Amino acid sequence: MDNAAPTSGSNLRPTDAHLPTDLHTPLRPDAFALSEEDKIASITEHFREIMQLLGLDLTDDSLAGTPRRVAKMYVQEWFRGLHPENRPEVRLFGNRYQYGQMLLERDITLFSCCEHHFVPIIGKAHVAYLPGENVVGLSKLNRVVQYYARRPQVQERLTRQIAEELKQSLHTDNVAVLIEADHLCVMSRGVNDTSSSTITAEYSGAFETDATLRAEFLRLLGK
Ligand SMILES: Nc1nc2c(ncn2[C@@H]2O[C@H](COP(=O)(O)OP(=O)(O)OP(=O)(O)O)[C@@H](O)[C@H]2O)c(=O)[nH]1
Ligand SMILES: [Zn+2]
């Protein structure tokens, strides 16, 4: 990797260049020097080695394909949100119906990965905004959540990345994001607590300054 010649994707705008620096997911400058297929091939070899070090017999026909399965899962599914090409395009429509109240998209399925232990974070994201001149296609809110979730993450940064992306794409500061999630690193190892969960929230614009609006957001969520 260190000596890899930049090939496909080397002229891409870096991931998160549009976000404030403190919200960047830490990436190497050569993050996209390898093509997707070369990355999968290399991760396959490394994962094969991990399995062999664990003592597993990779000639077993159930295990033989696992290294490549894991490599494809990492690059194409779990961590697809690292690649700037997968950033969703958020198209706006004119607010012809003059809808002026909060729009809340609740219970967005959230599947992420703890960057400390590489095990799942599973939960729900709730996002709201106050429409002005424009409204957004609902599914784009889910897509923004998914893009930032599909990376190694900590929940605090994920929450703020989603809020910042929505502020920029919707051209408004009036945005709220609340995430409730279970961390498998807390549930299945270490402290082994299967009942605790983690809630994070980011309020900006009117959601930060107007306590009534924020209370309405939380009331709609049953909080
Ligand atoms: N703030 C924050 N911490 C997280 C998140 N996901 C996991 N962690 C924590 O990251 C910390 C890593 O701490 P370490 O002490 O280095 O790791 P560890 O020895 O495995 O810690 P234990 O989990 O307590 O066994 C743990 O306390 C995790 O619970 C997250 O999204 N946000
Ligand atoms: Zn963890």
Image: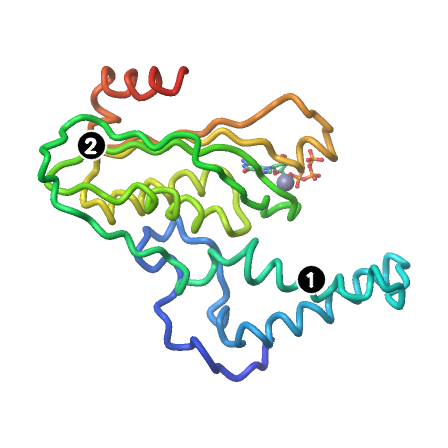
| Residue labelled with disc 2 | 130
Q: Position of residue 52 (x, y in %)?
A: 85, 63
Q: Residues within 10 Å of mark 1 (few under 14, many from 20)?
A: some
Q: Position of residue 94 (x, y in %)?
A: 12, 45
**The disc labelled 1 sits on which kind of residue?**
Arg
**The disc labelled 2 sits on which kind of residue?**
Leu
The structure residue drawn at horizontal position 67% and vertical position 68%, both measured from the top left corner, is 43
Quick one: SS at disc 1? helix
**Residue 15 circle label:** none
Depth check: give the residue in front, 137 or 193. Answer: 137
In three-dimensional space, the C-alpha distance between marks 2 and 1, rounded to whole angstroms, equals 42 Å
Residue 178 shown left or right of residue 67 in the figure: left
The structure residue drawn at horizontal position 35% and vertical position 68%, both measured from the top left corner, is 13
Q: Quadrant of ligand 2?
A: top right
Residue 176 shown left or right of residue 153 in the figure: left
Q: Residues within 10 Å of mark 2 (few under 14, many from 20)?
A: many
Counting every numbered tag in the picture gives 2
Check contact, mark 2 vs mark 1: CB within 8 A.
Answer: no
Q: Position of residue 157 (x, y in %)?
A: 44, 42
